[in-house]
Amino acid sequence: MSAGRVIAYIVSAILILFGVLFILGAGGTGGGGWGWVGTGLILVLIAFVLIWFASRKKATAVGDQALTLNIELPGNVSLDTLKCKSCGGALTSKNINMVAGAPVVTCPYCDTTYQLTEEPKW
């Protein structure tokens, strides 16, 4: 929770407390009358509006950030002809994922995984 939200909730709680005190203090023989009731209602209304704005603001967590990985394959790899070594099923670029920093191909037919290794370019 951000510091702004915490401050908004604390200020709202204080405004609600004073609003209720104003409303309660309006009654009785020594009370403030209808002016205090109006002031109390305004304070409570401001507090609820502040709570609404504080709860409306969306917090962004570290895990919510998008991460894009670009995989550079060696020049001699053609994904059109890449086939599974176990079942011979055709593999596409959608079957390539990053696992522990290494590109890994998973066969959609037999669930066999292979790590892509780059041969030297010389």
Image (tube, rainbow, N blue to C red):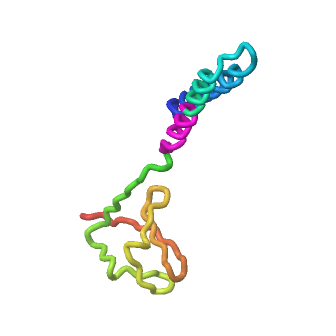
Q: Looking at the rendering, in which quadrant would you find the C terminus?
A: bottom left
Quadrant hosting residue 19: top right
For image coordinates 54% across by 81% down, the residue present is 110
Residue 21 relative to residue 43: left or right: right
Residue at image coords 63%, 28%: 16
**Viewed as shown, does residue 26 lie left or right of 35?**
right
Where's residue 62, x and y in %?
49, 44
Q: Nearer the viewer, residue 118 or 1?
A: 1
Question: On the image, which quarter does residue 70 sit in?
Answer: bottom left
Above or below, comparing residue 33 to residue 100 in the picture: above
Closer-to-camera residue (111/38): 38
In the rendered view of the protein, which quadrant contains the N terminus?
top right
Q: Residue 9's x, y, as percent?
A: 58, 31
Does the segment drawn in magenta span residue 55? yes
Which contiguous range is marked in magenta? Answer: 46-61
The one of 67 and 107 positioned closer to us in this rendering: 67
Question: How many numbered circles does the render carry?
Answer: 0
Dominant SS of magenta comes to helix
Displayed quadrant of residue 7 = top right
Please tell me which residue is depicted at 45% across the width and 81% down the height of the picture.
84
Among all residues in the image, which is located at the extreme right? 28
Q: Is residue 11 magenta?
A: no
Give percent across and percent down for residue 88.
45, 86
Q: In this orientation, which residue lies closer to the viewer: 45 or 56?
A: 45
Residue drawn at the location 29% of the way across and 66% of the way down: 74
- Residue 63 locus on image (x, y percent): 50, 48
